[in-house]
Amino acid sequence: MTSTKPRRLVSTDDDDPRIRSLERQVRALLEEVHDVRKERRHEALTDPLTGVGNRLALTVAFKEAMAARTHGAAPPALLLLNLDAFKALKSSAGHAAADQVLVTVAMRLRSAVRENDVVTRLGGDEFAVLMPATPKNRAAAVGNRILAALEPTIDLGNSSVQCAASMGLSVAGSHHTLEDLLQEADFAVEESKNEGRNKLKLFDPVTLHSRQLQRQIVGDLREGIRSEQLVLYYQPIVELATGQIEGCEALVRWNHPIHGLIMPDQFIPVAEATGLIAELGRWVLCTAMRQLRQWRDNPAKSTPAFSMRINVSAADLQSLEFVDDVRDVLLKEGLSPDSLVLELTESAIIRNNELDRYTLMSLRRLGVGLEIDDFGAGYSSMGYLRKLPVDRVKVDRQFVKDLGDDPCQLEFLAAIQHVIRSCGLEAVWEGIETAQEAELLRSIGCTSGQGYFFGKPLPEADFLARLKATRGHLWPIPEEFMGHK
């Protein structure tokens, strides 16, 4: 009977040279495959320009660090940094020099971090360092070492540059994703830039909430401007000798559909910080001058023509369109330039840069009044009064509030009044709340005043009713003051 077992094709003898040769070939092939895979993995995780890790490497490192956390390790921390003024460097020095800077920065990052920290470049001039099992204080120490490592100048051959970075730090929580961590660190980077750059900022949830609230306010305010939620209140400026109204200040309020009437100190700073102040200021200018035109066209009242006072921001002085906006609204409403007085804070005009000077001189040539608001609250320098193209100053309320209590205060205010007059300017005294204050200021030659004694800011209808109630030229101020005339 013939056997059905298959015949052996290869000998099982371990000493068979053919077996050993085949094994060597297989082993070499496997090692080659392993090396290729390793090399491809390295390429997949590496930034080709700098040699540090890329975004995928950051993802892998984060997953490993969070996996270790489930076994009792401390949470990972993330440092995110942007090079300061890198775009300007790239424009001036060229792409090759910019690449050289990135390579040098990557080398310095590697030298400043610890052995297990993972340095990555996310793109452009943005780098990230993932630090496994690292508490906040140790992560901050690494961040400060990085800032110190970046301080020395970088040699570019024909020139050298100094490279600084704005850096943000965030520590992962139990439910953090990598995107959560990156967003928090990126927010901290923004805070670093806002505070002057080249520093490390720790992510603060309270600050984040404040910023989110600010963004919400900006969105609501932009909508409020477009949907007529803003309203103007008007407060009189009065001639102290006669009680005659000589002007009124337009003060903006926000009639929010949910939160009700919001005062300007709650939204003006947000508008200034986010660039919305120009649009807001344009609305105030147009609305106030349109209102003044309507009052002058109203035959039911018999009051003398008075000026409109409008607050101007530093952003307005920096706008090339601002002078044109003022000219256009005066032409549209058929009002003379002297019917408008623009109030500028000391801080807005003390910078004395070329664009500010151009805007102020253009407004002066146009014929509108220019007034320094809250004089004495900031720089309190009398020397610059002669140099600025302004007509008058509004003296800050802090000088008036102690007038009745301090006998020396009146002499001090008289000296201020004398200096202002010697500069060829007139003064409006702010914060007058009593008849005594009004009379004392009048007695030293002060001509104009503003404050709750003469009237609080009023909406248009109430303000117009007060104008009608005068039946002539006088503001209806309390009788005790009128008795001092």
Image: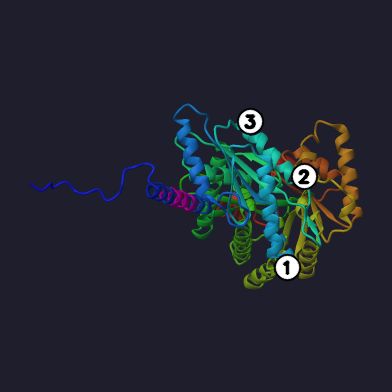
How far apart marks 2 and 3 lie (CA) works out to 46 Å
Magenta region: 26-37
| Quarter residue 80 falls in | top right
Q: Is residue 53 above or below residue 410?
A: below
Q: Residue at x 58, y 46 (%)?
A: 186
Out of 159 and 338, give the one closest to the viewer: 159
Which residue bears the numbered disc 1? 337
Q: Is residue 444 above or below residue 99?
A: above
Mark 2: secondary structure = loop
* Marks 1 and 2, the one that precedes in the sequence: 1
Which residue bears the numbered disc 3? 137
* Marks 2 and 3, the one that precedes in the sequence: 3
Which residue bears the numbered disc 2? 396
Please identify, in this view, whether the residue under mark 3 or under mark 1 is nearer the observer.
Answer: 3
Please state if 327 lies on the left or on the right of 69 as rendered. Answer: right
Out of 174 and 327, give the one closest to the viewer: 174
* Marks 3 and 1, the one that precedes in the sequence: 3
How far apart marks 3 and 1 lie (CA) works out to 61 Å
